[in-house]
Amino acid sequence: MPDHKHRKKTLLRTLKWLLTLLILGVVGLLAWIYLIPMITADAVTVYDSYTVQTGDIHTTKSFSATLSVKKSETFTTSEECTVREIYVQSGDEVKKGDQLILLSTGELFTASFEGVVNEIRVKAGDWLWRNFTVVQICDLEHLEVSMNVDEYDVKELSIGQACTVSVISLGMDFDTAIAHINRVSQAQGNVAFYSVTCDLTVPENVLPGMQATVTLASDSVAGVVTLDIAALAFDENRDPFVLVKQSDGTYVETPVETGLSDGMTVEIKSGLSAGQTVYAVAGTESVKAAVTLEDLYQMIVGQKVVINDQSSRGGPGEGGPPSGDMPQGDGTGTLPAMGETSADGTATDATAATDAATSAQPAAADGTATDATAATDAATSAQPAATDAGTADTAASATGAGTPPQGLSGQQPQTNPSSDAATDAATTTDPEGGSTDVQ
């Protein structure tokens, strides 16, 4: 029993996943069929323009580098001893020959070059063991810039070649030259690298260990035809070309021959002349401002257009406006109100006569009135009959007698006893007591 429940739960879970995947698939299909074409439709290609100019192009090579101490000196003990005297403090500037520290063995440490006391690790009276580092001085004004250059670029470098060192953290640039190229490589993987150094004189805020970039001039050309590199496009053979606009508004691919480039500007050796304007495809732009929810709805389910909607105007017998003549004025510019009578008791509402004609149509179902035109004429004749009687009640009985056909709801029209009013309206009363059938 538990196995049966477990299988049932597994089956239900599987069915839920399948249903979810099916729904996602349907949504994706609808998006692919309707949404994507609608979004990408009505798109036009946009072009950017570029002007061919004349100028100079200079190319450079850049390498990552590190600042390091070029000259430093560290003093250590040669045997076990104690510190007898200290003559300097950390950070002091010293000159060549200045005394630093005196040991109990009589050994005196003195500076061998001009620099700064970088570190003192002892104090007077300390006992020291052999080869213990006591003090260090460094030249922090004359540093060395070290960089590794691969085997493809080292052949373009030479000793004395000018370069610019940029200290990244401080944003400071220094002009210098290549001082040494190590010809013995330091292999890294399948590529050989060579150590290249430059000498650099720096202020006190530039310290060893800071990261820098060394930039060296490579190639240059002057007074050539140049173009923004973004204007170039390439065909299937990787040959460059630009778009030239014709007089009819079309764009034609024009091949060009390129030369030196600095990554922003390229030399044009042939195909263009200075002052010429060329174009490049910038992308596409939709004609429609945005895709709205209404657009999506109409795209998926379509749009229903209703022409001459009369649903709010009512049908026959429902109080809607008549399809016949509109009420006529009395010559004073004022239309008579609906349902009013004239001064002599005559019904002035032309709608009443028309409604009588309309009410006569259902009567045709039981054979009372067989001609809609005849019923209309009968209703028209009913108006003077109401006038002779001196009351509007007879005309009123001719106007409100009908009911709308039931066939609108899918049923057959039924005979309505009140429909006989149309026939009665078509029969007038003779003043002498008889009746006349008006046809």
Image (cartoon, rainbow, N blue to C red):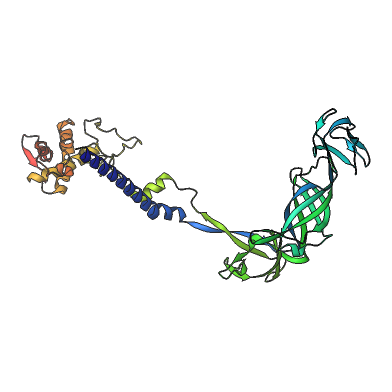
State which quadrant residue 41 falls in: bottom left
Query: Closer to the camera, 195 or 129?
Result: 129
Q: Quadrant where the N terminus lies?
A: top left
Which quadrant of the figure has residue 261?
bottom right
- Residue 360 location (% of width, % of height): 14, 42
Q: What residue is shown at x 18% (from left), y 33% (from top)?
A: 396
338 lies above or below 11: above
Judge whether residue 144 can be spotted in this image: yes
Q: Using the image, determine if residue 253 lies above or below residue 207.
A: below
Above or below, comparing residue 91 to residue 32 in the picture:
above
- In the orientation shown, which residue stands out farthest toward the left? 434
Query: Depth check: 170 or 110 in front?
Result: 110
Residue 418 spot, x, y in % from top left:
11, 36
- Residue at image position (79%, 35%) is 129
Q: How many labels does the image show?
A: 0
- The x, y position of residue 60, in whole percent, is 75, 59
Task: Spot the residue most to the top.
Answer: 125
Taking the view exactly as shown, the residue that stands out farthest to the right is: 97
Q: In this view, does 210 lie to the left or right of 110?
A: left
Residue 56 visible in the displayed image: no
Q: x, y (%) of residue 168?
A: 74, 46
